[in-house]
Image: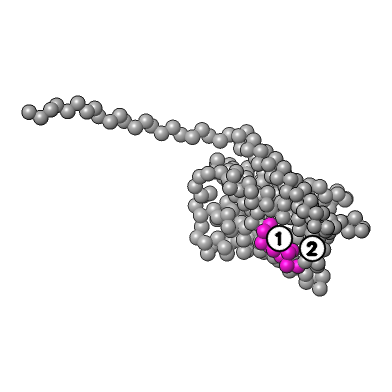
Amino acid sequence: MSPTSTSEPAPAPLPAVPAPPRTTAWLLGHFALDVALYLVLTVLLTVVAVAVLLGAGERISAPDGTHSPLFIAAALLATALAGLALWPWRRPRGGPVGSPLPWRESLVMATFAGLFAQALPWVATQLGLPLDPSNAEPLMALLAQKPWLAVLLIVGLAPVAEELFFRGVLLRRFALAGRPSLGLWCTAGLFALAHELVADGPLLPRLATIALYLALGLVFGGVYLRTGRLAAAVAAHAVANAMALLLVTYSVA
């Protein structure tokens, strides 16, 4: 006789527990934490960059009190490295944002968005809005003295690093939690303040310039949400910056 089987049936799998919903308070809390980390890293890296320049015998300011092009490049590099460092650490895990568009369609949209973004300053001037970006003169000085470095930082490194942080970390978290509109406005507002927060001068040009950067943040964030591809937002940002450099070079020439 064969022995009687005493094996018991396998237990039924436990039902999957859905992830808790991401509340607005939770999203804004992580948003504030990411911004704080970004600021701290930027300050620390800027201090290190300045120490390296001083140790190499370089001057970080001109006799008239303006910053030297090397200091401007160091500050840009510190800001970019902060964004690059935070992206792999703070990037929300999960699938793609929405349904990604095909690459060709995404790049076409990114190109048109970059050109549209660069047309916004012209529209603002036609409407009589006084624009006075605080980074215009330092970047023009960097472009005049070290054009290759200016192109590398402004067209290459800055769009990648800024989009990785503002869209790849901050906006992505809102989008994955089902709050893309809230994230779009929060990240665009932070993008504007990050470019003009410490600026001084007359109030109206400051507000007009902040509004311009807010519009740029909405454009780049909109490209990311519409295409579902972070590379498309990077491309749009790079096109806008490249066109700005071309216009500045042409006007100076």
Q: Residue furthest bottom?
A: 253
Q: Position of residue 10 (x, y in %)?
A: 28, 31
From where the camera sits, is residue 116 visible?
no
Secondary structure under tag 2 reads helix
Q: Amino acid at mark 2?
A: Leu
Q: Is residue 151 magenta?
A: yes
Secondary structure under tag 1 reads helix
Left or right position of 79 against 227: right
Count of number-bearing discs: 2
Q: What residue is drawn where x is 53% and y is 44%?
A: 93
Reading the image, the residue beneath label 1 is 153
Mark closest to the chain's N terminus, 2 or 1: 2
Query: What secondary structure do most residues of the magenta stretch adopt?
Result: helix
Reading the image, the residue beneath label 2 is 142
Q: Nearer the viewer, residue 166 or 149?
A: 149
Q: Residue furthest right?
A: 64
The label number, if any, that marks residue 237 in the structure image: none
Q: Amino acid at mark 1?
A: Leu
User: What is the quadrant of residue 92 in the picture?
Assistant: top right
Residues in magenta, as a range: 147-158
Q: Position of residue 146 (x, y in %)?
A: 77, 66
From where the camera sits, is residue 15 visible?
yes
